[in-house]
Image (cartoon, rainbow, N blue to C red):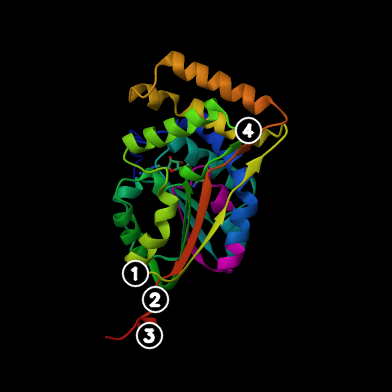
Amino acid sequence: MSAAAPTTYAIRGGEDGARRLDLLAHTMAPTTEALLALVGVRPGMRCLDLGCGGGHVSRCLAGLVGATGVVVGLDFDPVKLDHATRASRERGLANTEFRAADVTGWREPESYDLAYGRFILSHLADRAAMLARLFEAVRPGGTLVLEDIDFSGSFCWPANEGYALYCRLYESVIRRRGGDANAGGQLYGLCVDAGFGEVQVRIVQPVHDGRCDAKALSLITLANIADAVLAEGLATADELEAAIAALRAFTDDPRTLVGFPRIFQVWGRRPTASSRPVG
Ligand SMILES: C[S@@+](CC[C@H](N)C(=O)[O-])C[C@H]1O[C@@H](n2cnc3c(N)ncnc32)[C@H](O)[C@@H]1O
């Protein structure tokens, strides 16, 4: 399968995008690893990482499924896939496979024991159709695990106009590109509607203080949506520059807190023929 051009994706791809995902993965590692421990990833499983980016979660899954398992990562950004492939090779992980694909046109019926997707559904226009394809891709008895953002739950302390503008621009640009930055809250209902059973939900929300590197994630994200914000006419170059300067000063202040959006973690099981309600 050849890579489709990521024309609608609002966040800068390529090397800049790959570096941003390294920081994002570092922030998310504790809560994502706890989630995977909770849902139960076992040796020998065949797993999917939908919109895998630099393959951070794919590598975590690869460690859990071991040499008898397989992890397939799908993404349409060839630069990130290249990073993912190299990182797996450097760690000697022979059980990962990264493929270029636009997930909106992808189908692999009954191929996975577990399908996982982090921060991908919020970028897609037809989330119900994606859930239908994920239901189809998971084998009966298999598990779906999703994590996604709810930007309406973003916060910082104290209040800051640069941060507030960042949140408004992020929500607007994602909407213009067909996604929804508040999709996290929809995941539970989408999973139930798609036919998954035993659906459960949990909320996590990282926050950064002092001068840690990850505190700059919101600032870096604002810089990485700049091209799309300008292309969509949501702000002028001067307004963007002022917002970036304001958010940089706020981020550099060791007394401030920069929060993440609220993140929904949702998981459920595809029923087997015998577990389906009769009638
Ligand atoms: C916010 S990043 C998350 C990456 C990874 N899941 C993680 O949590 O580190 C979203 C990823 O989805 C990919 N993506 C967005 N839309 C896509 C599509 N239609 N098909 C394939 N990949 C897509 C982007 O290239 C990007 O790598």
Q: Which residue is disc 2 drawn over?
A: 271
Q: State if disc 1 and disc 2 touch (CB < 8 Å).
A: yes
Mark whose residue sits in front, 4 or 1: 4
Q: Most extreme residue toward the top, as rendered?
A: 238
Q: Which mark is residue 274?
A: 3
Eyeballing the image, is 272 above or below 32?
Answer: below
Residue type beneath disc 3? Ser
First in sequence: mark 4 or mark 3? 4
Mark 3 and ligand 1: say if the CB distance to the nearest ligand atom is below 8 Å.
Answer: no
Secondary structure under tag 2 reads loop
- Rendered residue at 72%/31% (across/down): 255
Q: Based on the displayed image, in which of its 4 quarters is residue 271 positioned?
A: bottom left
Side of 233 relative to 48 (left or right): left
Label 1 crowding class (10 Å Cα cut-off): few <14, some 14-19, many 20+? some
Secondary structure found at label 3: helix
Task: Give the mark, 4 or 1, whose residue is nearer the N terminus.
Answer: 4
- Residue 20 location (% of width, % of height): 55, 34
> Does the Cβ of the disc 1 residue fall within 8 Å of ligand 1?
no
Instruction: Looking at the picture, tell me which residue is in the foreground, 60 or 85.
Output: 60
Q: What's the CA distance linking mark 4 and mark 3?
A: 54 Å
Q: Within the displayed image, which quadrant is ligand 1 positioned in?
A: top left
The Cα–Cα distance between marks 3 and 2, rounded to whole angstroms, is 8 Å
Q: Amino acid at mark 2?
A: Pro
Which residue is more in the foreground, 64 or 33? 33
What is the number of the mark on residue 231?
Answer: none
For label 2, count other residues whose C-alpha is less than 10 Å away and answer few (under 14), some (14-19) or many (20+). some
Question: Residue, x 40% and y 33% (percent of image)?
Answer: 10
Which amino acid is tagged 4?
A: Pro
Quadrant in the picture for the C terminus: bottom left
**Which is more N-terminal, label 1 or label 3?**
1
Magenta segment boundaries in residue numbering? 36-59
